[in-house]
Image (cartoon, grey):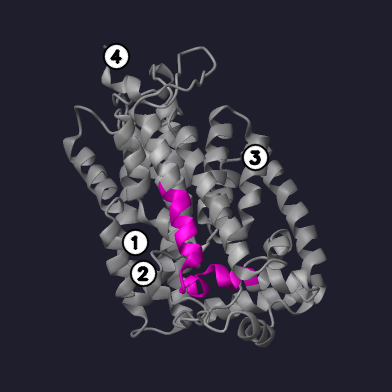
Amino acid sequence: MNPPHAQAMTTVTRGAPAKRRLVLNEATIAMFGAAVLLLGAVLWADRSPLTEKTDFSVTYIGARMVHEKQGARLYDLAEQGKMKASLLPNAEPLVYEHPPFEALLLSPLGGLPYRSAYLIWGLFNASIWLVLPWLVRPYAPVPHNGLGYVALWFLFAPLGIALYQGQSSILLLLLFTATFIELKHKHELKAGLWLGLGLFKFQFVLPFVLILLLRRKWRFVAGFSLMATLLAILSVVAVGGQGIVSYLTLLANIISHPANISLGSATDMATVHGFIHALLNNSVNATTVLLIVGAISTALILFTVWRWNRSEQTSAQFDLMFAAAIASSLVLGSHMFAHDLSPLLLAIFLAAAHLPRHRWVGLRAILFATLVLFWIPALYFVLIASHRMYLLFPALIVFVIAAMTLAAKPGIPLADAGSLRQKCC
């Protein structure tokens, strides 16, 4: 009889390349069920009368404007409003604040009817969701039971929110995963290229890049810079020089109006900015809040760099510090909603794979408690409905500190994914 961990999704042996083969077991059946569930959910959402009210309506308007050669006016909110009123009169009063290159790359969707575009984008996101468990499993083989592992991918509410809303957060999770895998194999240039593609959500990518820049990972920075340059050129092609100026003005307006719901209310964000704004907004002015946020953000980045540099750089310690860096980058983002927490799933899987088994019971309990918290779907919906997502910020900080502390402990019996023999579903 195979040991319990043989129900995992891949075969990995020390000193040999990973071999992946399809095996009919409970994990295979679970993934098949997951595929049916996800594709069915996308088809159902596409027929829903509420589809126009999803975040994808904003993405569609941006793609449509570029498709119709109106890129120069992409960040003119009045023009966005006219386009939305003519195509999607029932959409929420949100604005398109994504980078210009995204609108250009998605402009083919803008040439399609709205529901067709929503369906294609939903199927794309669902496909990524189904690929991710297969990619992550060799590096975070927890739980050993394949059915339980697949179930955890569906208990993480931000993924489901991202899929329904037509957001790009699942794609960002894929890019962080690709970055992790390339760094794990010492392919720093490729890792930088992959993460550079994530600049459509630059508020989360740039803090991570800054951490590696301060760690002097020059090849990573070179790859990232190369991709960033390419996307910058595409942005100019999409909206022109004046469009770039309008975009920067819009970003400044968003930062200076943290309570504007159309631009994204800060209290709906589990970030440094969202938390400090919620605590001090009635006590100090906006400038003071920004100064405090800047000081805390700088301290968190420097602390992450310092702890990463001090770690022994074993495989397990790299995993834990990468997890901490992802969580740090998310809370440092200036603009974040529940679906934007999708990349956190990679971090919590990596942390779960390296929980201490015997010693430091208190540290294990703290880290385990945060992992359980993140996997409670109802929590997200309660916080979203009450406009108190900022309350999740302390849990994220506890997770960051716990992961860093665990990485710094010498001699912890951490799991080495490379030494585990597993079977693919």
Between residues 308 and 202, which one lies in front from this camera angle? 202
Q: Residues within 10 Å of mark 4 (few under 14, many from 20)?
A: few
Q: Are marks 1 and 2 in contact (CB under 8 Å)?
A: yes
Q: Main secondary structure of the magenta part?
A: helix
* Image quarter (top left, top right, bottom left or bottom right) of the C terminus: top left
Specify the label residue 220 is tagged with: 3
Q: Position of residue 224 (x, y in %)?
A: 67, 46
Q: Position of residue 274 (x, y in %)?
A: 40, 70
Give the labeled residue for mark 1.
393
- Determine the residue positioned at 19% across, 29% down: 359
Give the residues drawn in magenta, as a range: 37-60
Placement of 410 over or under 133, stated as above or below: above
Q: Earlier in the sequence, mark 1 or mark 2?
A: 2
What separation in Å lies between label 4 and label 3 (alpha carbons)? 40 Å
What separation in Å lies between label 4 and label 1 (alpha carbons)? 41 Å
Q: Are marks 3 and 2 in contact (CB under 8 Å)?
A: no
Q: What SS does tag 4 mark?
A: loop
Give the labeled residue for mark 4.
2
Q: Position of residue 35 (x, y in %)?
A: 45, 43
In the rendered structure, does residue 57 fall within the stretch colored magenta?
Answer: yes
In the rendered structure, does residue 142 fall within the stretch colored magenta?
Answer: no
Quarter location, residue 206: bottom right
Q: Earlier in the sequence, mark 3 or mark 2?
A: 3
Which of pointers 4 and 1 indicates the residue nearer the eye? 4
What separation in Å lies between label 3 and label 1 (alpha carbons)? 29 Å
Q: Is residue 209 left or right of residue 154?
A: right
Q: Earlier in the sequence, mark 4 or mark 1?
A: 4
Amino acid type at image mark 2:
Phe
Amino acid type at image mark 4:
Asn
What separation in Å lies between label 3 and label 2 (alpha carbons)? 31 Å
Give the labeled residue for mark 2.
275
